[in-house]
């Protein structure tokens, strides 16, 4: 029997709804919030207000594009966390309302597991290769950086994690220092293509945990390089933007790769995936593909539309949970932090 899931994502600054039938995506609608651009970062209060404005039209469009009415939906999957509490509340409350109104069960989804399971979304018109279990996934987003061992859709173990900033945060904060718009990751990616990745050298971390990451030292080292250079030449950043972006990206990617390679060796796993917003980065994608060619991995790079936040990944995660009978009660409340959800 077919299972149809409506997915709702509202953890940060994208309001998204998607419909999936079994593992095949029928629709995936995303409303990004332009309201934060002028502040150079996400303002939580504005994000939840924008979610409130967007959620009804976004869900309505997703259902229409999929050609599905609420009575054909088996379950509503929603992001319970981690994320901004006010934003999560909008999605969770909307899911509850829809659940009560149409008598449809709810399924809670961990946003990070969603990013990882985006590798199992099938598209109606094209074949996408899926990793085999167990595989390793480098999960790199704006808020998290982890190496995860994935043994099944519901069994995931964090092997390594960042002890301070996330990789996406490193991109965004360094971009801000250079006066680039938010989010800085995609802008640095674009500018890096014109620059020399060896032009500047920034500090690389020495972290105790064998598979753990740290990015705050790199951020400080980047900041000091700029501060010292600007003191003698105020136009330094403008003149060296491409080289700075290329060198920064090169450093972040090599930090990410070092530990990922270590983990594949230690665990003897050769199916390697990347996921999360930073997995859109062209330098990281090229480096993972290259490492895979050299080391005999099967590498899995998500389609770009599934790298940043989207509800398709929430819907596919909901599908696997629903199949296992994991229904969530109406008394559920969202959680902001990862520790509270795993
Ligand atoms: O997964 P995501 O959409 O949201 C979170 O769950 O955090 O990730 C957002 C992050 C931001 O830090 C953004 O700068 C980064 O992903 N990002 C990129 C690229 N596209 C998005 N970073 C580097 N290169 C990109 N092309
Ligand atoms: Zn995300």
Image: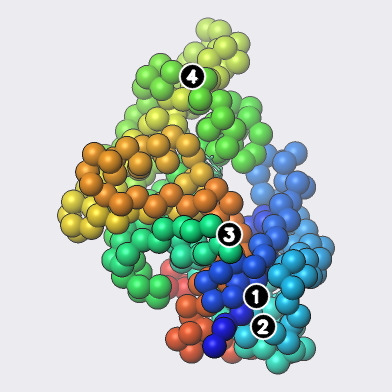
Image disc number at residue 330: none
Image point (32%, 37%), residue name: 290
Residues at circles 3 and 1 in contact by the CB criterion of under 8 Å? no
- Point out the frontmost of discs 4 and 1: 1
Residue that mark 3 sits on: 125
Of the image marks 2 and 3, the number of the one nearer the N terminus: 2
Distance CA(mark 4)–CA(mark 1):
43 Å
Of the image marks 3 and 1, the number of the one nearer the N terminus: 1
For the N terminus, give its image quadrant.
bottom right
Residues at circles 2 and 3 in contact by the CB criterion of under 8 Å? no
Residues at circles 2 and 1 in contact by the CB criterion of under 8 Å? yes
Residues at circles 4 and 1 in contact by the CB criterion of under 8 Å? no
Residue 31 lies in quadrant? bottom right
Is 250 located above or below residue 231 in the figure? below
Residue that mark 2 sits on: 73
Query: Is ligand 1 less than 8 Å from the beta carbon at label 4?
Result: no
Specify the farthest residue to the front: 125
Image disc number at residue 6: 1
Residue 332 visible (yes or no): no
Helix, strand or loop under label 1: strand
Residues at circles 3 and 4 in contact by the CB criterion of under 8 Å? no
Image point (79%, 62%), residue name: 54
Image point (32%, 64%), residue name: 132
Residue that mark 4 sits on: 195
Distance CA(mark 2)–CA(mark 4):
49 Å
Distance CA(mark 2)–CA(mark 3):
22 Å
């Amino acid at each position: 029997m077919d299972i149809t899931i409506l997915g709702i994502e509202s953890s940060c600054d994208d309001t998204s709804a998607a419909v999936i039938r079994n593992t095949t995506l029928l629709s995936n609608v995303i409303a990004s919030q332009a309201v934060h651009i002028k502040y150079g970062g996400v303002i939580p209060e504005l994000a939840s207000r924008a979610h409130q404005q967007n959620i009804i039209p976004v869900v309505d469009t997703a259902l229409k594009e999929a050609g599905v009415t609420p009575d054909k939906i088996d379950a509503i999957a929603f992001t319970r966390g981690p994320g901004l509490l006010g934003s999560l509340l909008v999605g969770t409350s909307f899911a509850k309302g829809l659940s009560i109104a149409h008598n449809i069960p709810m399924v809670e989804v961990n946003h990070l597991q969603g990013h990882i399971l985006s590798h199992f979304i099938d598209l109606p018109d094209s074949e996408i290769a899926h990793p085999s279990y167990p595989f390793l996934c480098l999960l790199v987003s704006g808020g998290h950086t982890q190496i995860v061992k994935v043994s099944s859709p519901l069994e995931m173990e964090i092997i390594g994690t960042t002890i301070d900033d996330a990789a996406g945060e490193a991109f965004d904060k360094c971009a801000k220092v250079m006066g680039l718009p938010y989010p800085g990751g995609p802008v640095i990616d674009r500018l890096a293509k014109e620059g020399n990745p060896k032009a500047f050298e920034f500090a690389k971390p020495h972290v105790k945990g064998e598979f753990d990451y740290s990015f705050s030292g790199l951020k400080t080292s980047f900041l000091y390089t700029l501060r010292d250079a600007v003191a003698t030449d105020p136009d330094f950043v403008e003149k060296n933007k491409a080289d700075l972006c290329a060198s920064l990206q090169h450093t972040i990617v090599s930090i990410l790769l070092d530990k990922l390679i270590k983990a594949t060796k230690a665990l003897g796993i050769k199916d390697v995936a990347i996921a999360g917003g930073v997995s859109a980065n062209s330098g990281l994608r090229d480096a993972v593909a290259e490492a895979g060619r050299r080391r005999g991995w099967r590498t899995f790079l998500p389609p770009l539309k599934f790298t940043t936040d989207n509800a398709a990944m929430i819907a596919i995660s909901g599908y696997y949970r629903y199949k296992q009978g994991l229904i969530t009660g109406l008394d559920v409340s969202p959680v902001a932090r990862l520790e509270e959800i795993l």
